[in-house]
Image (tube, rainbow, N blue to C red):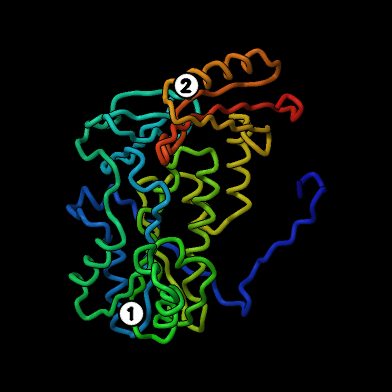
Amino acid sequence: RARKGEYVLYEMRHRSRMQQMAKVYTVDMREELKNGNHTILSGKLQSLMEERLERGEQIILFLNRRGYSGFVSCRECGHVIQCPHCNVSLSVHKGGKMVCHYCGYEQPKIRVCPECGSGFIGEFKAGTQQIEEMVRRRFPQAKVLRMDMDTTKKKDAHTKILSAFANEEADVLVGTQMIVKGHDFAKVTLVGILAADLSLNVGDYRAAERTYQLLAQAAGRAGRGDLAGEVVLQTYQPEHYSITCAADQNYVQFYKQEILMRQMLQYPPVSHILGVLVLSKDEALATSFADELADMLRGTEGLVLLGPSEAPIAKLRDVYRYMIYGKSAEYECL
């Protein structure tokens, strides 16, 4: 809309006090595996953490958990199993099958990578608690705080953790996306982004955009005070444009790549998309009604139909859920 002149585009080209943007190192975790490092902390990140702890500076370790344990990828070559029809990752369901939540395509869960033949293929398993334990083992001298859904359940827990870190009562803060949303810690000079590409594989056409947003926000936490900042961005897909553009902190280049993908696949904002959610406590009734509704919509001129397929959460509170998607360049078709 800005390009069309409908909106005025305002850009922030500098930080508030003209601080330098953090230097970003992209680490290919496939190479770490080849070099015998089977942990989630790369050699580069560990060495920079050692430096910061010696200097009395602070560290944030951000685990990008969007898409956590929902897709299958290869740790050796980075290949992610995708739907052949929709350009989104297949999601793992119970019963050993992988499903596309847009068109309903299914295939059995695989045990060997179809690209490189490696057996290092499966779902991502690490969580914030495991990372906290790993940091404590590797750096016993460090004081570590963890901030996630488990540690913030109690009243005011969120504020207490952030205040303790701001008051320099801890050296390392480990957490999920809640720790990278606009916080300003002057002594944080290192941010480690663990599993940067997890959110690329959530089975959603907006995955690349949301990944870029998260990574740009996370990188922006380093070097906000007088000390220069560095970021280690760990990934199995270092060549993906959302990763390279986030590392370069180049939104315009990301936009150019992403809008091209949206045009090719006819996703918003280039096209319009409608999602219809079918709910029933009777599974047979839910599937038959979803099929019937899809047959009715299939004849609509200018409408591309995807599905019906199981919703991302296929059953919730004993209610079965199915999705139908319709895409059209003309809003009236929907």
Q: Amino acid at mark 1?
A: Asp
State which quadrant residue 169 falls in.
bottom left
Query: Residue 297: image x %, image y %?
Result: 63, 18
Nearer the N terminus, badge 2 or badge 1? 1
Name the quarter where the C terminus is drawn.
top right
For disc 1, the marked residue is: 171
Residue 311 versus residue 178 in the image, above or below: above
Q: Nearer the viewer, residue 66 or 53?
A: 66
The residue located at (30%, 51%) in the rendering is 29
The residue located at (50%, 39%) in the rendering is 204
For disc 2, the marked residue is: 285
Q: Residues within 10 Å of mark 1 (few under 14, many from 20)?
A: many
Residue most extreme to the front: 281
The residue located at (65%, 37%) in the rendering is 268
State which quadrant residue 156 falls in.
bottom left
Q: Does residue 42 appear to the left or right of 217 in the view shown?
A: left
Secondary structure of the residue carrying numbered label 2: helix
Query: Residue 265: image x %, image y %?
Result: 58, 29
Query: Residue 189: image x %, image y %?
Result: 42, 76
Q: Does residue 212 appear to the left or right of 263 in the view shown?
A: left
Query: Residue 85: image x %, image y %?
Result: 48, 24
Q: Does residue 218 appear to the left or right of 120 in the view shown?
A: right
Q: Amino acid at mark 2?
A: Leu
Secondary structure of the residue carrying numbered label 1: loop
